[in-house]
Amino acid sequence: MCGIAGYWKPQDDPQPEIVAGMLDVLEHRGPDGRGIHIDPSRGLAMGHARLSIIDLEGGQQPLHDRDTGRVLTVNGEFYDYKRIRARLTCDGERFKTKSDSEIALYLYKRHGLDFVHHLRGEFAFALFDEVDERLILVRDRFGIKPLYVWFTDDCVAYGSEIKSVLMHPSAPRRLDRQMALHQMMQVMVPGRTGFEGIEVVEPGCMQVIEYRGSRLHRRAIRYWDLDYPRAEDHDPDPDDSFYITEVRDRLLDAVATRLEADVPVGCYLSGGIDSCSILGLATPMQQSSVRAYTIAFDSDQYDESAIAKTMAESTGAEQVLLHLSGDELYGDSFASVLWHAERTFYNTLAVAKWHMSRTVKEGGRKVVITGEGSDELFGGYPFFKRDMYIHGLGLDPAEVERRNAVFRGAILSEEERHHPAWEALCGFTPSWLQPWLFTLDRVRPLLSDDIRRDLEGYDPGSAIAARIDPSRVVGRHPLDVVQYTWSKTMLEGQILTWGGDRVDMANSMESRPAFLDHHLAEFAVRVPPTLRIKDGTEKYVLREAMKGILPRVLYEREKFAFMAPPSNTDPAKAAKVKMLADVWLKPERIENAGLFDVGRVQAFLRHAWHPDDEHATGARNDIILNHLLCMQMLDAVREDPRRPPRADGT
């Protein structure tokens, strides 16, 4: 894993110091080396900060194939690269390194833009074709690796993180007002960021930028997407054993490919069946014991470490247990994670995972395999089950809500909520969206009068729905609908950003989510909904596939969403978050940022400290408080992207 950055301004000489500055803020992504390619004749500058995982001695980038006039910088991993190298070598190609990245140059030479279909892994990369005068920006199918771009008709700048793009002197440094509201409610519009003019290269997409007629022209190409069958095309009488075996075989292959590295590979381990399955499969594939990393919270309601310990013991893994309390979840840690995430986070799980990746790095490791993506593919979340019951089976969802009462106000809505744009798109309003619509009601009045006037009539719910491809939703089973819409919004915009790459790479540590292997995903969409959630059991097909390696207590356990304890769960955490609020939410700082109304924020804060609030209210207050702090800190990042803000406001 690495960091990439660069810019192309065809009519100007490229300035090495600009791309060097863009790389400076990505040093945490690539501390093992740096390379820059400058082409004065084309106005091109491409940079690469390297974290060496494959081909430790060679493989420096940018990779420049002078015979074909192509330059490549890659962030990520291409799997099956040895097989592809061997096949291409048989066809007469000669590789210059042992790096996995180099295969992209030769696949592009052979297949043109169709080369992306031959790539497997998690990646974001830039390829410049000197002959056709075009820059190609590509992101993996799920958006595991980040890639941002700022584009005008005479200049394009890109980078692995927004702060890198902000370091280009022409890029705007303004917060996007619409996206400020979206960040406060938690759900972003796919393709947009919190910064004006800076976009996300969407998952499964590439942007092709060409120089024609003294101008840059851009087109986006979607090369992959989740493609659920129409509802009537699902197997009406499925053979459980067929789907169980196929899921097992594909997951085995996904884990095996992700163990490929020239450095030791560990595992993240929570108390869920996802990470436990990964550990259970990785252990027999390794000659030595696998090191497993587990977070322990100081709240019985949120702590899963006891179950994780059971799994570690059953596999003989070397478990590293990280105990976290309010001291670690707030203060400078909170501010540092915001700088790395570059967007708000509603729960300090982001901070907890940042501490965990730091623990991995301090222990001398660079790579872990993780369990992200399992819930998205196999219907694991409580809100998926709720919609399956209401819209798929016609059952009463009360039992789901009772069992998951701890999440009311956070990931489960305390009341039914409807939105017309989503009703038109899906036939119902997905349960995953409903709590954030309630949060929207609470946060919109906190905005400054100026921003509220500017956003009068703007409907965030409709803006999000407008970015969902109707052809992937219409005629699908309700469970397919909610899994697809969640994956296009919250998976990429939340779980794989502040819950994944950004907090891992903050500590120069690579995470590999095996469930998000596209070969596994392409089969998972064909698994009938009644085998994903069967007789009230979520992820049934995965449970059965992994039954032989999961401890009984875990095999029989209902899904528990992995979250950090909110600040209202004990006085110590409330005191810690109040210390942050006293600095970042003091009236003069709110006034200077211009995002929020001072009086209304102060009124909210007076209410937010009540520990005896009804559970949903207290949970939502904690969410809003986290968002307020993050937005104020994000304004500081806008002013100076080079370094993280501090808890004391400096």
Image (cartoon, helix red, strand yellow):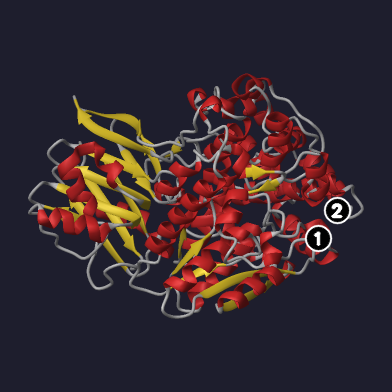
Between 357 and 406, the one lying in front of the other is: 406
Q: Which quadrant holds residue 12?
A: top left
Q: Amino acid at mark 2?
A: Trp
Task: Indicate the position of residue 79 as horizontal and vertical percent values.
Answer: 33, 57
Label 2 belongs to which residue? Answer: 609
Label 1, secondary structure: give it. helix
Which residue is drawn at the image coordinates 32% and 38% (left, top)? Answer: 156
Which residue is drawn at the image coordinates 85% and 64% (left, top)? Answer: 571
Q: Are marks 2 and 1 in contact (CB under 8 Å)?
A: yes
Task: Indicate the position of residue 251 as horizontal and vertical percent values.
Answer: 46, 56
Q: Which quadrant holds residue 51?
A: bottom left
Which residue is drawn at the image coordinates 69% and 48% (left, top)? Answer: 537
Task: Identify the disc placed on residue 574.
Answer: 1
Residue 171 at least partly seen? yes
Which residue is drawn at the image coordinates 79% and 37% (left, top)? Answer: 397
528 shown above or below 369: above
**539 lies left or right of 448:** left
Task: Identify the disc placed on residue 545.
Answer: none
Task: Indicate the position of residue 600 as horizontal and vertical percent values.
Answer: 80, 39
Crowd rating for badge 2 (residues with CA inside 10 Å; few <14, some 14–19, many 20+): some
Q: Which is more N-terminal, label 1 or label 2?
A: 1
The total number of labels drawn is 2
Residue 645 at least partly seen? no
Where's the C terminus, which quadrant? bottom right
Where's the N terminus, which quadrant? bottom left
Q: Which quadrant holds residue 58?
A: bottom left
**373 lies left or right of 594:** left
Between 497 and 313, the one lying in front of the other is: 313
Crowd rating for badge 1 (residues with CA inside 10 Å; few <14, some 14–19, many 20+): some
Task: Indicate the position of residue 373 as horizontal and vertical percent values.
Answer: 53, 50
Q: Amino acid at mark 1?
A: Ala
